[in-house]
Image (cartoon, helix red, strand yellow):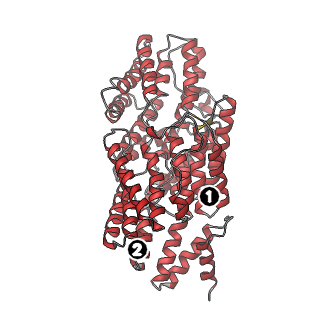
Amino acid sequence: MKLTNRIFISVLLLTSLHAAAAQETHQHKHEMSEQVGRVNFKISCSAKTQNQFNRAVAWLHSFEYEAAEREFTQIATADPQCGMAYWGIAMSNYHPLWAPPTPDELKKGASAVERANVAGAQTERERNYIAAITIFFKDADRVDHRTRSTAYSEAMKRLYEQNQTDHETAVFYALSLIAAGMMTPDKTYAKEKEAAQILNRVLASEPQHPGVTHYLIHSYDYPALAELALPAARSYAKIAPASAHAQHMPSHIFTRLGLWQEAIKSNIDARASAIAFATKHKMSGAYDEQLHAMDYLAYAYLQGAQDKQAWEVLQELNKIRQVDPPSFKVAYAFAAIPARYALERRQWAEAAKLSLQPGTVTNLSWDNFRWAEAYLHLARAVGSARTGDTTTARAEVEQLKAIHQQLLEVKSGYDWAKQVEIQGKIAEAWLAFAEKKSDDAIAAMRAAADLDDATEKHPVTPGSVLPAREQLGELLIELKQPREALREFEISFRNAPNRFNGWYGAARAARLADDQKTARMYYTRLIELCAHSDTSRPELEEAKKFVARK
């Protein structure tokens, strides 16, 4: 996309997002909520349920599925003939951009769509909504998640094409396009761009709609597009302040662009909101959104050498005894936070000794999240290889291969097998390096980097625990090829900008290549990045000494 087009679209987004004050003549058409945004989803059920239905849909658009289901269930209890209430319960168990529904969620969703079809609906529009979600839950025991998700999206497309002025249909269809793009990666981002076009049209008249800004962030949650989402990122949290996910979601874009202090603030707010939500609803454990925010928070802290702050996040994680629900977000946080804390600080011996158990949490099993477990095997493999323990490193490489093979047999929404394959190649490369097999090491790491560049992260992750292209630069430095290393670091900035180890690696490579001007530039950027540091890392001291030289 040309720069002029990006600027035009960004201005359009910013203008629309600040147009709320000019919408007074239209506010009578919407139900206001100071907490979750404004939604107007007209239904034919009892008039007294309309306000609550709008609120439930607003929760749904912010991926607050537990809150949404609670509201929809209350509507169904008050009006058992409201088919759309059961539609809402089913939608609350779908979560298209997250992990596929669990067996219990599939059962609950199937039951809800059955009741929706029995209750029926008074309008063709509502019957079409119910029919679309019925398609997703039908034959879930025989048809894989991706096929059913695609069929649901096609049903929503037909509904959208019948009435493109129906904003809720447009927003839900756009979400299904984003989900389709995630399951079938395409570097042209055709589906995501189509979704964004639809959402931008709705945004012009509904700037306070939580789903519009939320899904725009997801549409543009890619390195090549992230700048376009900044207006939405800086508005969404204000639209739905009661939602922990809404507080967190802007940090996706801040992380993509390396805006670490904004990412930190976003996730501090998200963590506080999640804790308040758990307290209000008397949850038996920590709300999973709290751990999701903590993961992004730890990652952002580590980029600016705010290691004491990151340590506090890790300590908070280790004190959690129970989670609600024990979702994929929780599994990822328990694997990624300790792995990042060791690897980002280049503490290889620490990484080699990481535990494969999530502390003392009682209701989380790695058996359901082998792809998350892989991050700990990666940390142990790299840590062991870089401390010369090739026996342990090889055992961890074999574990990664086994997990990869197991995931190849799972047809879920996202290709976690490919991510584990990348991790396995990184681990193989460092093992080969430790065994003094330089050519094998470079071949494996280059394969990892190329594969990493060709794939996209899952929305649960702030980014790779170890960006493969950055790791290739690290390996080339160790193999005394600094000029080639510098080139790889500079390529890595396209997908992983403003990272501590990225700037440091580039500076070190330039210094070793006797390119003093470039080394000074990157060391200076590293120092600027660490303006809020609370720890004196050796790499940062090296940068300060180099820049201080005349």
Residue 490 appears anywhere in the view: yes
Q: Where on the picture, by quarter, is residue 150?
A: top left
Residue type for callout 1:
Tyr
Residue highlighted by disc 1: 301
* Nearest the eye: 439 or 279: 439
Q: How far from the left and from the top, in percent, is residue 4?
A: 45, 60
Question: Is residue 219 visible to us here?
Answer: no
Residue labelled with disc 2? 476
| Above-or-below relation of 124 to 383 | above
The quadrant of the picture occupied by the C terminus is bottom right
Which quarter of the figure has residue 453?
bottom left
Please name the amino acid that badge 2 sits on: Leu
Is 506 left or right of 547, judged from the image as shown? left
On screen, residue 28 versus residue 483, left or right, reads right
Q: Is residue 107 above or below residue 178?
A: above
Pointer 1 local density, CA inside 10 Å: few below 14, some 14–19, many at least 20: many
- Tell me the CA gap for discs 1 and 2: 27 Å
Q: Residue 93 in the image: x percent, y percent?
A: 47, 28
Q: Is the Cβ of the residue at disc 1 closer than 8 Å to that at disc 2?
A: no
- How many residues crowd around disc 2 within 10 Å: few (fewer than 14), some, or many (20 or more)? many
Of residues 256 and 228, the one drawn nearer to the viewer in this rendering: 256
